[in-house]
Image (tube, rainbow, N blue to C red):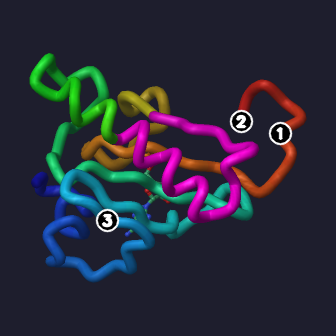
Amino acid sequence: MSDTIFGKIVSGEISSEFIYEDEHCIAIHDVNPQAAVHVLVIPKKGIPRLVDAGAEDQALLGHLMLAVGKIAEQLGVAEAFRLVVNNGADAGQTVFHLHLHIIAGQVFAEKNL
Ligand code: AMP
């Protein structure tokens, strides 16, 4: 857990609708969606940034990738989505509890978001 908004959502201190949950992660709709589908996959373990993950997190990181696939299927966007991880403030990270953005529901004409 972490003392961030996502840590509080994971712990239930702040209520949020989980569209997916398993033993290691949850998924919620982004409160400020950047596309028709914008979902955040959040590990229950509060790793601040991707670069803070260690060898002990290898299975967790793989688990998150497999969860993304399941959630994309559940959302009906498995044929086309982008997966984004912002690492560090200069990359746009605002919540320092690792999370993966699933962004979909539009045709991405540009290579960059
Ligand atoms: P990042 O900029 O990569 O740290 O992403 C943080 C994301 O969390 C942003 O897209 C925010 O819109 C989103 N966000 C912040 N607070 C909440 C919340 N309470 N529920 C859902 N999404 C949130």
Would residue 18 appear left or right of 108 to someone viewing this image?
left
Q: Give the numbered dot on residue 49.
A: none
**Contact? badges 1 and 2 (CB < 8 Å):** yes
- Residue on which the image places disc 2: 113
> Which tag, 1 or 3, sits closer to the chain's start?
3
Residue placed under numbered mark 1 in the picture: 108
| Labels 1, 2: front one | 1
Cα separation, mark 3 vs mark 2, equals 27 Å
Which tag is nearer the camera, tag 3 or tag 2? 3
Horizontal side, residue 86 vs residue 51: left or right = right
Where in the figure is residue 55, as x and y percent of width and height? 14, 17
Q: Position of residue 58 (x, y in %)?
A: 22, 24
Number of residue marks: 3
Q: Amino acid at mark 2?
A: Leu
Left or right of residue 45: residue 85: right
In this rendering, is residue 73 above or below 29? Answer: above
Give SS at disc 3. Answer: strand
Residue beneath label 3, please? 21
Residue drawn at point x = 57 percent, y = 64 percent: 74
From the viewer's side, name the closer residue of 40 and 3: 40
- Extreme residue toward the top, this view: 55
Image: magenta residue range: 64-85
Residue 52, picture quadrant: top left
Which residue is found at the position 15% from the left and 20% from the top? 54
